[in-house]
Image (tube, helix red, strand yellow):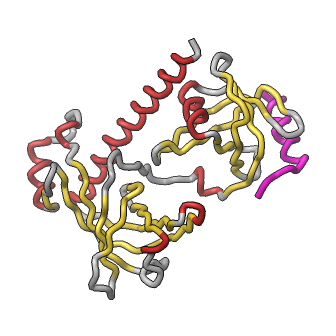
Amino acid sequence: MLISSPDLIQVLRQIAKDKSEIRLLNIYKGLPISYDASIDFVDDSEIQIHGNKHQLACLYYQGESYLQAEELPYIIRSQVISLNLSKENVIFSNFEAVKNNIGNRTEIRVEPDEQLVVTIQFNGSAADIFAPLTNISAGGASVIFEAYMFPTRLCQPGNDLTMTISLPDKFKKLSQKPAIDSRKLNPYSRTNSTEGQDGKIVITARGKVIAVQPEFQLKRYRVSVKLYFKDLSRIVVLQYISQRQSEIIQDLRILSDELYNLKR
């Protein structure tokens, strides 16, 4: 829903006048990137915000951000109109109200750094269905179905399923933490999961469909699934998420440095 209400502009003006902070939120490779910022000025349809270096890198590559503030009645999706790296400010316009769950993620989810295809078997169906994994968290995952392959009858919210995921074995890349004895962790994790080919660890979990989101322009469907990881399979997933989180943050830092080098 596009917003042109004078009331919204008035609220933004008051935030700027009070020198209150407004939070910018971007989702980069599944990971929320969020920093507080200040509003420099507000006119009838645009606002200028002074931002953080890493947040500005997200804005440059994504062209939009979500605005959050205690004074705002809803989260606002906003489009980047212009971005000045030397002054570290950005102008937003075309404000749109979005669902509040954008900023209320209770679990970290990450996108894979390589194509991972999961195997899904729905209850009541003997056939295995394959789909690319788009993100994963400690409590679930999302997959994509091309429209012509979408199993409409099976992919209904509430339907039970079993999902098998082959995750890269990132244990060797992780720095050791004093609280974890890796000599005990790795052999036990192999017992609760199957070591696949090419350094993959295969885990299986039961779950259910919780949401189906059509992406009509891309001619595909995004399906979100709640998964119940058991025993050490959960630790495998948590270790993978932790490593991907570090990689994504490092990737953003590199992009930010490269972007700022261009302005010199």
Q: Position of residue 2 (x, y in %)?
A: 79, 54
| Vertical relation: 28 (above or below) 42 | below
State which quarter of the image contains the C terminus. Answer: top right
Q: Position of residue 50 (x, y in %)?
A: 69, 25
Q: Residue furthest bottom?
A: 124
Horizontal side, residue 195 vs residue 103: left or right = left
State which quarter of the image contains the N terminus. Answer: bottom right
Q: Which image quadrant is residue 193 in?
A: bottom left
| Vertical relation: 242 (above or below) 57 | below
Q: Position of residue 55 (x, y in %)?
A: 57, 32
Label tally: 0
| Vertical relation: 147 (above or below) 188 | below
Q: Predominant secondary structure in magenta? A: helix
Horizontal side, residue 17 vs residue 33: left or right = right
Q: Which image quadrant is residue 41 in?
A: top right
The residue segment tinted magenta is 1-19
- Which is more toward the observer, 75 or 164? 164
- Which is more toward the observer, 264 or 36? 264
Q: Position of residue 114 (x, y in %)?
A: 32, 48
